[in-house]
Image (cartoon, helix red, strand yellow):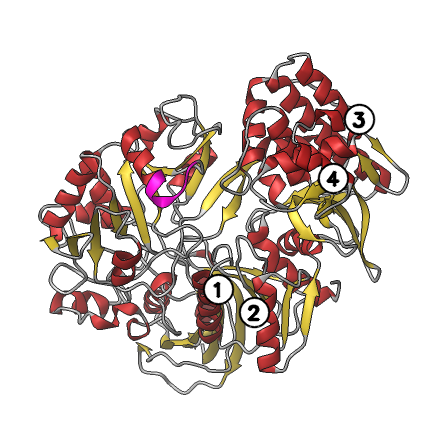
Amino acid sequence: MSKKRLALKIEGIVQGVGFRPFIYNLAQRLNLTGYVQNQGQAVAIELEGTKDKLDKFVELLSKDKPIHSQIYYIHKNWLEPINYRDFTFKDSLKNSTDCSFNVLRDLATCTKCLEEMWDPDNRRYRYPFINCTDCGPRFSIIESLPYDRVNTTMNSFAMCANCKAEYEDPHSRRFHAQPIACPNCGPELELVDSQGHLKAKKDQALQLACEAIKSGLIVALKGLGGFQLLVDGCNQKAIARLRKLKNRPAKPFALLYPNLSALRLDVQVSSTEAELLQSAASPIVLLKCFIDKYTEVAPNTPCLGAMLPYTPLHHLLMDELDFPVVATSGNLPGEPICIDNEQALSRLANIGDLFLLHNRNIKIPLDDSLVQIVANKPVLLRLGRGYAPVSLAIPKINKNILSYGAQERNAIAFGSSDVLALSAHIGDLDNLRSWQHCQDVSTHMSNLYSFKPEVIACDAHPDYNSTILATEMAKKLHVPLVQVQHHCAHVFSCLAEHQIELPVLGVAWDGTGYGLDGTIWGGEFIKIAPKLGWQRVAHLRPFPLVRGDSTDPLRSAAGLLHQAGLEEKIEQEFLKIMLNKNINTVHTSSVGRLFDGLAYLLGLVDRVSFSGQAALAVESLCNLANFSRFYPFTISPLGLIDWQPMIKDIVKDIANNRSKHEIAQLFHNSLVEIILQVAQQQGITNVILTGGCFQNRYLIENAINNLTCAGFQPFWNQQIPPNDGGIAAGQILACSYKYK
């Protein structure tokens, strides 16, 4: 048969996953000649051989590809043969005009590397930075593309002869594994005190760090995407000290367990949750806890955030300790996670007793991802290590759009050529370091993607720092600025990942969002229809909120009582006066503030120290009761949802000493029924549940169940966070639809 030449360009996640050695070995097996080459963010292949073998190659390309690779597009071009003599690897070629968002995420340590690390006869025995093409750092160390060692923070480590031989061997598991290293040529550990004085190196540093944790000290560990603060998870005194030093009085911590068996002793773990915990992403997973020994770790919540070791260093550490440890982000309140040794010693010196450091630089900070299971589907609550950046195919995107998200739980997003990419969690933009971090992420990812914005998108709130950043960037680049209403962006964030046909009814419930009528929105029903754009078709009756300390649920409770005609129940005279005279008040339709008010009325929370604390306390009561009834409410023909009858009955039940568990249950049931009745009123089959309130597992799962039983098709955020971490993605799609 005559020889033919086939040129292929593969787009997708095809760099840093052993894709080129797979191509090489497949070509060798089929006796094909040609070459494979990284080009920008794609892989180019040219092959010569008979037509049947070339067709077989394309078939096996998709069928047998490496486990962590993803092929989005295969571009084919048949050419005249030029008689290649063998199959080779060409040096990588960077295409400055290539804008693609297919960057590989960081991967948890694979089984084969762990086997080698525990083998005393292996040259990488107990080496805390072992990796291969199937595992190890990726996004966190990439400085530019294509993904070659010279373009990563590993460039400062010269490979020894043994590592170089593996790196250059197409049959090796470490062929072109860019972070390849061993004890002779790679990164190493050192332990220092809070003043930076050296205590130990290499394995001794690890051993002393473990002894410190056992003795109740706080160890700051440089991990994969940044620093973590570690303490004994069973040492109440040590945890209380960490809370005080980090100024984190009540927010739950996550626990790092040595293995799945130890985890199962404390929490319920479904097969889906176990799969998540042991996946290549290896996130923190919210699990139902059935013992109360971790009340200091996760107070006033029925769930426990837990994870398993995901780097060689964590495996070595937890093997020595063999008990769960608190592992929380190494940062000061409101600041980005520390990634640099000197930075950590400067900012965390008053928290960490000892610092377990290494000399592999981190390019981009990545918090641990946070996931919970909703209706048997994983839902990302915080996008970080193992998942970031998320990229989705979005057919509507035909311009380069950069969006700056919201003020809280900020993340930024990029849209281009029918693809959307969402950055990792950045944080709340309420201080200079977070502000600078947002700018740094924007610059780094724009350079990484060779991205030049044609449109800048942001929230409609004029005072958000993200809006200010976006406005400055639009002026600097001389491109249009598009402001997208907050709850509209929430709905579009879910629309983006599910590609739902319009019309849809979006239920966007959260704590706060800039309303177009001068009030604070947060209990919204938004209809999106073809050509008609979006429309606010229903919402909670607004109630007055005295401005001031937003961490005070008392103000929400007072506003609810005032609006419901129960002013005599408000004990604070100054609030009565301000509400009666409308002094320094704003009206809100927020479901989040409704939760805050109920938490105060039930005596659960007087003040909150983190977002969602009051709602979490109310939700935690629902696991102990099960009632199908709900409190009364009304919905007008124009979609005004009057919650006043509900609050009046709740106040009566509290006075009559009804169980707090029953009240919380009935309250949640009422919210679920409101969703169902508005959906029936609007008559739209596809219903989206989005916004921070739908992190409440009881609320969303019962809403999903009721809607499904009534013949509706519910959708909820999964790959994109339902909270404000998904706002930037929604802004991209809203711009593409031209619905703002």
Q: Between 584 and 332, which is closer to the camera in this rendering?
A: 584
Residue 696, given in percent of the width and then of the height, sits at 58, 35
Amino acid type at circle 2 is Leu
Residue 355, given in percent of the width and then of the height, sits at 21, 51
Separation of disc 2 and disc 3 at Cα? 43 Å
Residue 367, given in percent of the width and then of the height, sits at 40, 52
Vertical arrangement, residue 344 with respect to residue 704, above or below: below
Question: Which mark, residue 435?
Answer: 1
Q: Does the magenta stretch include residue 120?
A: no
Label 4 crowding class (10 Å Cα cut-off): few <14, some 14-19, many 20+? many
For mark 2, what is the residue?
Answer: 469
Q: Between 170 and 220, which is closer to the camera in this rendering?
A: 220
- The earlier-in-sequence mark between 2 and 1 is 1
Frontmost of labels 2 and 4 is 4
Which stretch is magenta?
243-249
Amino acid type at circle 3 is Pro
Q: Is residue 248 magenta?
A: yes
Horizontally, residue 687 falls left or right of residue 123, namely right
Is residue 11 in view? yes
Check if mark 1's residue and mark 3's residue have beta carbons within 8 Å: no
For mark 4, what is the residue?
Answer: 579
